């Protein structure tokens, strides 16, 4: 059927709760699902024993403790029990719609890379997987309170065994490794399929305290920069670059996927211009007019509902 593989952070506190939620959700998708957890993180061996998962503690890590992508992907493709693999970040809860999407793609072709956008959702407690309606409840929670993130957040990669034979020493837990995987599959001629319309992949929100510099370190430390510099012969790509999309009507061609690089450049330019405009003009204007606006009752909370944006968007995706 399918093998999931991943690596985790120490199983303690909130991080331990959401990682156990994720691993259980994958294991319960189908009786013939295999789950492999890589790494010697605190609590990993105990969780694998409890949940009936396969534990592979031996992987290559950098001196900083960052885990090597080539080590995990290379070993996984050697030892898995199935011909289809899915690397999934260990904070992602998946439901039955994931397998439904996979079934459609398997009828289409034997080789593809299945990727999709995630839904950021606040989950702080263990999920009760004994509830028959758990999938329906999770999807309702994500779609009613969560935020569907942009195309650059790539948290799962489903692909055929043997696809990734040569991987540079990228590290997981920094930026740069996930768009490399998408670009490499494209360079090998494997169809990229965006299943965002059919799969509600639930990302359980968490902080970034595992890095001494928090999110800034994830994006800007030396290992993040090293990831960006490795193997420049491969064009970094995102979900937006997928030539195929799975929709309610089935598989359809993404007619404008080739515009994805231009869209990214435009968004970067737009963000720069907007940032400078807010800093130099808009924020000073708001500060100067705040007393008058308050006196006149012109506050955001006083706006009619029709004038407010009802679409939830993440600040980093604007």
Image (spheres, helix red, strand yellow):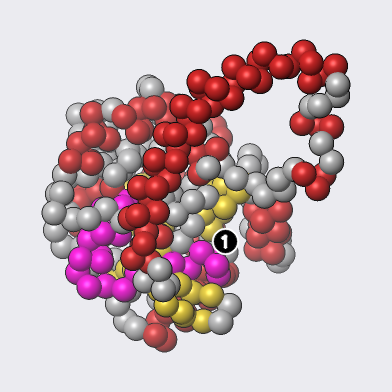
Q: Residue at x 35, y 33 (%)?
A: 219
**Above/below status of 189 relative to 50:** below
Please identify the quarter of the rendering in which residue 270 is found. Answer: top left
**Above/below status of 273 relative to 279:** below
Residue 44 visible, this angle:
no
Residue 123 x, y percent position in the rendering: 63, 43
Under circle 1, the secondary element is loop
The one nearer the camera, 66 or 242, is 242
Please tell me whether residue 192 belongs to the stretch shown in magenta.
yes
Residue 147 visible, this angle:
yes
Q: Which residues are magenta?
A: 178-199
Quadrant containing the N terminus is bottom left
- Residue bearing mark 1: 200
* Left or right for 221, reference 233: right
The one nearer the camera, 108 or 317, is 317
Please identify the quarter of the rendering in which residue 175 is found. Answer: top left
Please tell me whether residue 110 belongs to the stretch shown in magenta.
no
* Left or right for 148, reference 289: left
Residue 118 x, y percent position in the rendering: 51, 54
Residue 80 x, y percent position in the rendering: 29, 66
Q: Residue at x 40, y 68 (%)?
A: 256
């Amino acid at each position: 059927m399918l093998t999931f593989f991943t690596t985790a952070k120490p199983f303690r506190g909130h991080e331990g709760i959401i990682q156990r939620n994720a691993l259980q959700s994958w294991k319960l998708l189908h009786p013939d699902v295999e789950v492999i957890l890589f790494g010697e993180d605190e609590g990993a061996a105990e969780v694998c024993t409890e949940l009936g998962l396969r534990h592979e503690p031996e992987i290559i890590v950098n001196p900083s403790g960052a885990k090597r992508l080539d080590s995990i992907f290379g070993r996984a493709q050697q030892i898995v029990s199935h011909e289809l693999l899915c690397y999934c970040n260990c904070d992602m809860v998946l439901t039955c719609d994931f397998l439904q999407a996979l079934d459609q793609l398997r009828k289409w072709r034997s080789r593809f890379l299945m990727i999709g956008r995630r839904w950021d959702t606040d989950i702080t407690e263990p999920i009760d997987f004994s509830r028959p309606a758990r999938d329906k409840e999770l999807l309702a929670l994500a779609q009613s309170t969560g935020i569907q993130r942009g195309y650059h957040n790539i948290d799962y990669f489903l692909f055929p065994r043997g696809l990734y034979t040569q991987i540079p020493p990228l590290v997981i837990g920094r930026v740069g490794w996930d768009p490399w995987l998408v670009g490499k599959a494209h360079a090998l001629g494997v169809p990229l399929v965006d299943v965002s319309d059919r799969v509600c992949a639930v990302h359980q929100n968490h902080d970034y305290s595992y890095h001494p510099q928090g999110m800034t370190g994830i994006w800007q430390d030396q290992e993040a920069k090293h990831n960006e510099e490795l193997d420049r012969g491969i064009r970094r790509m995102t979900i937006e670059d997928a030539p195929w999309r799975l929709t309610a009507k089935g598989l359809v061609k993404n007619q404008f996927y080739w515009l994805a690089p231009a869209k990214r450049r435009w968004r970067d330019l737009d963000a720069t211009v907007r940032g400078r405009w807010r800093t130099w003009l808009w924020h000073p204007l708001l500060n100067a007019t705040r007393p008058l606006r308050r006196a006149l009752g012109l506050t955001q909370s006083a706006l009619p509902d029709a004038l407010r944006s009802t679409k939830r968007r993440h600040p980093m995706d604007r």
